[in-house]
Amino acid sequence: MIKPELFDVIELLVHIPDLELMPGMQGAIVENHGNNRYEVEFSNNSGETNALCTLSSEQFVVVWRSQTKCWLPIPEKVTAIVNYLPEDRQQKVLDFARSLHQT
């Protein structure tokens, strides 16, 4: 897993209905509370804050690194997401990847 750092861009893995945040939405880490808890700001295209919430690192994956100013490659994103899945679902992902490779 990629350790989240201040100002990294993250992508949600979970639905947070009370804030109208859906999986796939992106936000920026604005505070590290320790114990794998991070304050994340979600903004609109004008830069206005839509939501500010504390998330555990299991609720998101890092997709852009502030330190390197680079988007993570797709294999790293996939690996980060798969690492949070139970073993039976990891196997399904592996089987699916194998089927794609065969075509």
Image: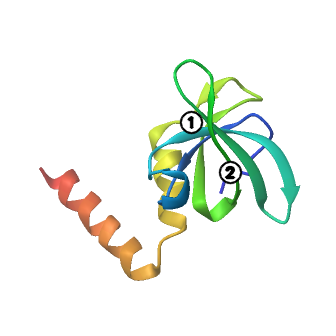
Residue ranking furthest to the front: 18
Query: Which is nearer the eye, 32 or 43?
Result: 43
Q: Earlier in the sequence, mark 1 or mark 2?
A: 2
Q: Is any atom of residue 14 visible in this view?
A: no
Q: Quick check: 58 left or right of 30? A: left
Q: Quick check: 58 left or right of 91? A: right
Q: Quick check: 92 left or right of 50? A: left
Q: Is any atom of residue 76 visible in this view?
A: yes
Q: Position of residue 37 (x, y in %)?
A: 78, 60
Task: State whether residue 94 is above or below residue 86.
Answer: above
Q: Which image quadrant for residue 33?
A: bottom right
**Residue at screen point 47% across, 63% down:** 82
What is the distance, in whole Å, between disc 1 and disc 2 at their CAs?
10 Å
Q: Which residue is mark 2?
A: 2
Label 1: few (<14), some (14–19) or many (≥20) C-alpha neighbours in 10 Å: some
Amino acid type, residue under disc 1 in the picture? Leu
**Residue at screen point 44% across, 52% down:** 23
Task: State whether residue 5 is above or below residue 71.
Answer: below
Q: Position of residue 55 (x, y in %)?
A: 68, 58
Query: Which is nearer the eye, 89 or 45?
Result: 45
Residue ranking furthest to the left: 103
Disc sitting over residue 72 in the figure: 1
Tag 1 near tag 2, CB within 8 Å: yes
Q: Which image quadrant for residue 80?
A: bottom right
Amino acid type, residue under disc 2 in the picture? Ile
Q: Position of residue 4 (x, y in %)?
A: 73, 48
